[in-house]
Every structure is written in structure tokens, then in C-alpha cells.
Amino acid sequence: MMALFVIVLLYSWLYFSIFCHEIGHFIFAKLAGMSPYLVNIGTGYKFLKLRLFKARFEFGILPSGGLTQARHLTLDRMKLRVILFASGGAFANFILLLLLIKLLIIQGDRADPIILIPICIEVLSLFGSLVPRKIIMYQQNLASDGQSILTALFTNYRQVYRDVFAAYNQQLYRYTNQPKILPKTFLDNDVKTVQIFIEACIKLYNYRDFEGAVELFGEVLKFKKISKPEKAFILDNLASFVVMQGGHKKHLKEADRWSQAAIKLASQSKTLKATRGAILIELGRHEEGKQLLLPSIEPENEALDIAVSSCYLAKAEYFLGNTEKVNEWLAHAKKINNPEANKVLKRIQKEINECG
């Protein structure tokens, strides 16, 4: 019975400690003027999901970690905000440790040795969170609290965001033939909206979480100051992901809608026409898709666009009965040897072989 009691105590206190740690992050995020939106407590099967204080709380069955995510609302004093947010979990563990030690002192000789178990847990949790290191949790590469604090001390956040804004703003040239109408800043330099956009990209390209990315991109598209090229850029990100992955056939109707909307916003964009053409071919509208793709194979276009367009032109020609041109287009794509396009090439070759 004693062994069972120890196991139950160990599980319960571990879970309680993780809960307090993440609540510490949540509270400190609020104090720092940030917007916490997700609190994960525990891992494994999620037995409870709640929405409280404008955030989603998810409880996993295993007491083996936690994660609190928050967005910045401004660039002002961001270094201090990040350090405060990252310190919240360790502060909660420190308070728990002080309370346990106080209880041990009060009980004196009457103290049950079992109290040493939660004390040890808090000591390990406190130091474990403050040691600078990288960890893998929730299928993500994350930084410990100590690593986050260390990184914050040596990061110029204003410069980081300026670089991010500039990089994304540069991509907008692909979505207009009138540079004068391009916004001077990406998403009006709105820190919160840019963070949501980056999170959406990470979900889409790093974790292949398509539904999660769609939800976040939807939030960005509702931003009041978003420009037409920015809208076209986001819609193309979603539609082209369906094209590139090929495994998202169930999202073809959505991709069709996104690409149509993007074309209306930037009708002269070769990038959008290429995406639209590939989607039409996936939908079986081969001749229509072919005509949209042909301008994308011109030498001045990007290698990825040329290679992917060549793959889809091969597919279109196959279903149009022009079999002699199929291998020409496949060879053209293979010659470019773009890593991302090679995945599309392999998939389309397989589809053609299976049909043949």
C-alpha cells in the first residue's frame, strides 16, 4: 500500500507542479502586457480542453511537461517582457518550494519524510527549467526557460522584427506588377498580426498542421489594414501548399476558392497563375490549367516555379492525350533538380505510371 501511495503522490504532485509552473507563465505574460493564447499542461492524450481568460487550456494525461504560448502586443521593452514571461514558471516552482520548506520547518520532528518527495520535485523543476538547453516537446524544438532568458538578453528584438518585416515585404513583389501600390511595411508592422502570420507559417511548413494554419491565416486575413498583395500572398501560401503536398486532395475545393480569390486581387501575377493552373489540373480541368502554366516556364521565373509547372504540364499533357510531350516536361523538371520540386516530380511520375 505504501508503494501505491508513493506512486499516486508522485503523479499528483508532478502534475500539480507542472500546472503551477504553466500558470506562473500565464500570469507573468499578463503582467508583461503580453497575450497568452495557449496553455498545455501535461502530454499524451488530452482529456480536457477549456477556454478561459481568452486562452485555450489543454490537459494531457501524462505529467511530463507543459508549454505556455503568448503573443507580443508591442515592440516596446520587449526584452524585459520576454525575460519576465520566461521567469514566471520558475517563480511558481520557487514559491511552492518555499511553502514546502516552511511546512517542513513548522512540523519539525513531527514532519513526515514523505514531504521530501514534493520538495525534491520542486528543486529539480526549478533548476531543470533554468538550465539553458534545447528540448523537444509537443513535436516541437523548444527552449527551456533559462535558454529563453539567455537568448532575450542578447537579442535586439526591434532589429529581428525589422528583418522579418523586410523579408516578407520583399516577397510581395511577386503579387503585383505595380510596385507603387506595395505597402511600405508588412502587415502595417503590427507585431501581434505578424506573430500570428509566422505561427501560421510554422504550423504549415514545419509541422504540416494544415487545419491549424488555416485558422491562423484566417485571423491574419481579418486584419483591418491588410493590403491586397498581402491577402494574395497569404491565399497563395495556402493554395500552393495543397499543390506541393498533393496529399491534401480533400482540400482541393478550398484551394480552388483561395486561388480564385487571389487571382482577383492580383490578376497579373505569374506566381498566382501557376498555382491556379496546377489546381485546375488537379481538378481535371487540364487544358485550362495548361494555358495558365505555360508562362511560368519562361527562363526569368524562379527555378521552383519552373520545375513545379513542368511537372503539372506533364500531367496535363498525359490526360490530354499528348503522351509524346509528357517525358519532355518531366525531363525538364528533373534537369532543374530543385529539392522541393523533386517531391512533386516523384508524385506525378507515380500517378502517371499508375494510370498507364
Image (cartoon, rainbow, N blue to C red):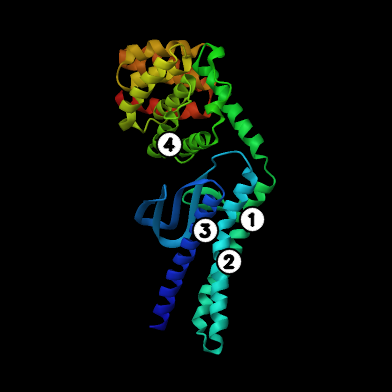
* Marks 3 and 4 in Cβ contact (< 8 Å): no
* Marks 1 and 2 in Cβ contact (< 8 Å): no
Residue pointed to by mark 2: 94
Residue 74, horizontal then vertical, whole percent: 57, 39
Which mark sits nearer the N-terminus, 4 or 1? 1
Amino acid carrying label 4: it is Leu
Q: Quadrant of the N terminus?
A: bottom left
Q: Which residue lies furthest to the right in this view?
A: 154
Amino acid carrying label 2: it is Phe
Q: Which mark is residue 216?
A: 4
- Distance from the alpha carbon under mark 4 to that under mark 1: 30 Å
SS for callout 2: helix
* Marks 2 and 4 in Cβ contact (< 8 Å): no
- Name the image quarter holding residue 325: top left
Residue 126, horizontal then vertical, whole percent: 58, 64
In the image, what residue occupies the spot 52% across and 29% down? 339
Which mark sits nearer the N-terminus, 2 or 3? 3
- Distance from the alpha carbon under mark 2 to that under mark 4: 35 Å
Q: Residues within 10 Å of mark 4 (few under 14, many from 20)?
A: some
Tell me the mark number nearer the camera, choosing from 2 and 4.
2
SS for callout 3: helix
Which mark sits nearer the N-terminus, 2 or 4? 2
Q: Which mark is residue 24?
A: 3
Tell me the mark number nearer the camera, choosing from 3 and 4.
3
Residue pointed to by mark 1: 132
Q: Residue 4 carries which label?
A: none
Amino acid carrying label 3: it is Gly
Tell me the mark number nearer the camera, choosing from 3 and 1.
3
* Marks 2 and 3 in Cβ contact (< 8 Å): no
